[in-house]
Image (tube, helix red, strand yellow):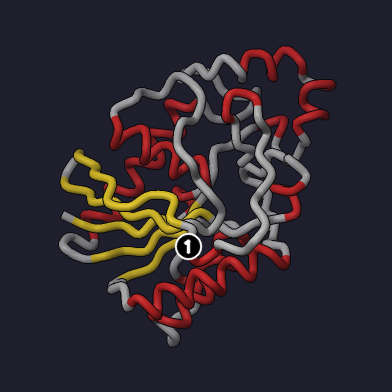
Amino acid sequence: MTELILIRHGETDWNRELRFQGHVDVPLNATGHEQARRLAERLAAERLAVDHLVCSDLIRTRETATPSLQVYFPEQAIDTLTDPALREQSFGIVDGLRVDDIKADHADAWERWLRFEADYGMPGGETTRQFHARVMDALRRIAQQHAGRTVMVVTHGGVLDMVWRTARGTGLDGPRQSDIPNAGLNRVRLDGDAVEILQWADTRHLADMPEQPVYNQSKLLVR
């Protein structure tokens, strides 16, 4: 049994611009850096035990993880604690594009995307089912490597969606149903194939900060 503290990266300019980030390496903006700082401050204040830290290899997660790394493991370098299997879903030809551009230039792909089918992916990208398998394999591997401990995992909104669906047993079809704010605090327990949610979308440390814009069609959050 392993506890995971799951964190979505802080805000980027592309979040504000409603762009699909996917595997594109986009840094945090000023708000994102402040969110990361506040997260680390809260973890330190509450003295949450963390035995290991790992993050996606993309810069927005590395920058989000760095203040927390300085709290827990100040002697370690963030680049030694990355795992590319924790990346966001690949969106293929629409990686880096704004929603309005996708609707204009890839209308058929956009309409198909909005059906939220598990076995569909944007051209050149991953299907939701492929993405789910990658994510859960990675998290179970991390849990096995650190069995009985607490691991902080800094990753992406799509990754957290896969965890939430697995824990709730909702399946992979259909739009996202859970709130996944930037730099929110989420805790789950992994025991073999079982996933139990202990805490989700806790943003008390971000209470007076501006909310991230959300594309409002069927609760689709731009990742």
What element does badge 1 sit on? Answer: helix
Left or right relative to 39: residue 109: right
Q: Residues within 10 Å of mark 1 (few under 14, many from 20)?
A: few
Q: Nearer the viewer, residue 134 or 179?
A: 179
Q: Position of residue 219 (x, y in %)?
A: 57, 29
Q: Residue at x 59, y 66 (%)?
A: 35
Q: Position of residue 220 (x, y in %)?
A: 59, 30
Q: Is residue 31 left or right of residue 71?
A: right
Q: Residue furthest bottom?
A: 75
Name the residue type under label 1. Arg
Residue 27 appears in which quarter of the rendering? bottom right
Work out whether residue 70 or residue 18 is closer to the camera in this orientation and state it: 18
Task: Give me the residue at 23% from left, 59% from top.
Answer: 145
Of 58 and 189, nearer the camera is 189
Q: Residue at x 46, y 50 (%)?
A: 86
x and y percentages locating residue 207 in the rendered image:
55, 62
Q: Position of residue 1 (x, y in %)?
A: 15, 54
Q: Say which residue label 1 marks.
A: 204
The quadrant holding residue 3 is: bottom left
